[in-house]
Image (tube, coloured by chain):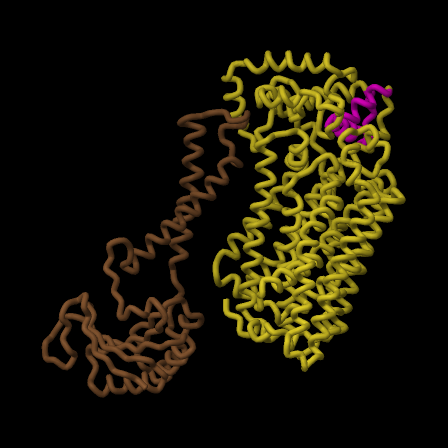
Amino acid sequence: MATIKIERDGAAGAVPHHNSSTVVAGRDILFGLYDDEVKLLDAVKAANADHLDIDDVYTPFPVHGLDPLLGLEESRLHIAGFIFGTIGCLFGFGFMTWVFTRDWPIIFGGKPYWSVPAFIPITFELTVLFASVGMVTVFYIINGLGPGAAPRRLHDRITDDKFCIAFDVTDMSGEGVDQLRDYFDRTGVETVHRKMVPA
Amino acid sequence: MENFVFSSRAKTTNLVLMGVGLVCLVISYFADGGEGHHMRFWTNFLHNSVFFLGIAALAGFALAAFTTAYAGWFVQFKRVWESFASFLLPGLFLMGVIIVGVWTHSHHLYHWNDEAAVLEDAILTHKSSFLNKWWFTFGTIGFVGLWYFLLGKMRNISIAEDDDTTDREFTYYRRYKKYAAIFLPIFGFTSAALIWQWIMSIDSHWYSTMFAWYATASLFVAMTALTIMLLIYLKSRGYYLGVNEEHFHDLGKYLFAISIFWTYLWFSQFMLIWYANVGEETIYFRERFDNYPVLFWLNLGINFVLPFFILMRNDTKRKMGTLFFASAFVFFGHWLDYFNMIKPGARLTLVEMAAHEGGHGTEEEHATMDHGGAATDHAGEAAATHEEAAPEEKYADATDLEQGTNLEPADATTGSAIESPGRRITAAEPEAGVPATTDFRGGPPTGDGTEGPREFEAIMDRNEVDVFEPNHFIQEEYIEDQEMLGHLDAAGGHDEGEAHTLGFKSGYTLPGLLEIGTFLGFLGGFLFFVMSGLSKARLEPKHDPYLEESIHHHT
């Protein structure tokens, strides 16, 4: 049993009802909230079967098996991680080599200046540091996140305990929207909402 | 297919492998004859026995650890590990041969088993409360027997569970878990004690607190690699259809992670010894650096660089081809790792014994040579290659030679004094109860055999002079040769140092055909046992409470 609610996006200011004739730059999103990831997965499968064009799916935690259903490509973030890690590795080792052989050579415990075994732990640490910090930075930049970024959420409980399937209905006819509502009803949705978001 | 059928073709293959192994063992027994104390045969036998016995034990460990942690993903193929673990019994028989050898003195794997050597050697005397044949015998039989008892219980419970359809309370599973929890701490302590006795005591003066971890991690990787290869084989024969890329992905992660863990331990052991630079510890790496560089670096390449770069990516762990390739290499690599742990030490024992038997000098000279192990090496090598040289010459030669390259506390030559004046002076102090003259296998002679306080003072004097040598000498020399171990070739020079190097010897420097054959033979025997174990019970434990989770496992 679906309850249809029409909401206003507080953060974006007054957002007109979709039936109103006012033209606003933005996207009109119809989304349903599910209370269980199993229902969500079944609903995504049903949408694929009906050839419905899902805009996006939002979940509070990673759901196994969702990516292949949505046809998402494998993330390329780890390539960034590898590159940053390599840079950190070379930087750490090169820096210590420069310091201990050129800039400020000191003998420690009778060891050679260029003491490779002593460099390895620090090289390792810098590899990890560069890889992790680099990956986080890249991730933030790509996703528009990070300190100061305004969070764009369709619904607060998506970050808590609800699983959301969203459709873009900006250019959709009334029948199309009704068809989507039918679909939500069929797949055991808890609530359906409609919301204007900035493009 | 519910049960594994041990096909006659697989049987034949394994039996042929075992035949090859047996032939290689027999040949290696006669290859180096009585003069070499059949060392090649005995080291090969010990090497492979410990390696496959260890794989069996580590399969039991994985089973017990995962069960105790409420893991479910591996349950589909847990019969494979149960079959691995039942190789403990034949493994115990193989170690029994070594035990008989210890009592009858048929082999000279362990220097601590030579009563005469122990008596005149302070370190071995000190260690003799642990390194003795009683401990070796009852430790091996008792501990491996205990493992076999606990893991055998687990296997029996697991098989009995299959036939009981009325068990609603998972009583079998609970009992299984109880034995797993009992096994874990017992295995943790006893496996360390056994690996010290079986492997580490081959270098009987040497010790490392990282060794048990290091050797066990090596076995864990080998066990995971063998499991992956066997599962891929079983899948190709139409078994284990439910074991899919998700399970292989997890096994691949273990292969990757434990390979890194092994490297971490390898490096920790190396770096601590390198940093402290104490002669009795560095001897282990010095020996391998000087005489086994290919083996030493190949070990690190196969077991770290290769799996690290192959298995780093997600998809290589999910494709059978790359996973099998990496597993095969790493499996052989860790066999090579054990080769590297065993052979150089055993060869050193041989060299030492040859010196014992070959040296006909006066008693005083003889004693000095025993005490300064490195000097003995050299003399031993001379004896082994049938070079007739007067004992005095050998001794003098060796002394000059070793002064530059050794890290012995009492070694107070120019180069070594620079290395760490503070440590050297304290280390040169005679320990209470231990004669200052004696002891370390790696050490050069500390004097002319009349050492005592007088000798110690002399060392102190020399140290004081050397400590204040101008620094430019060190800098130039060190920038030039930048040797990894920070070693002190300064005084001796390189040419003489190389003269000390032990030559290439197949079966010691690198595995020869006989070693590979023996390895294949033991592998055949292991697989024969595992496959007959697999054919005796259902492949999948159908009433295990975690079977469903395992079937629907998602990485």
Q: Is residue B138 left or right of B218 when viewed as pictured?
A: right
Q: Position of residue B417 (x, y in %)?
A: 60, 19
Above or below: residue B425 compared with residue B527: above
Q: Position of residue B271 (x, y in %)?
A: 57, 37
Q: Quadrant of residue B510?
A: top right
Residue at 75%, 71% in the rendered image: B9
Q: Colour of chain B?
A: yellow
Above or below: residue A124 compared with residue B378: below
Residue at 63%, 39% in the rendered image: B293
The chain coloured brown in the image: A
Residue at 83%, 52% in the rendered image: B96
Q: Is residue B238 among the parts visible in the rendering? A: no
Q: Quadrant of residue A48?
A: bottom left
The magenta-colored residue range is: B363-391
Nearest the eye: A32 or B417: A32
Nearest the eye: B374 or B432: B432
Q: Position of residue B458 (x, y in %)?
A: 68, 12
Q: Is residue B20 among the parts visible in the rendering? A: yes
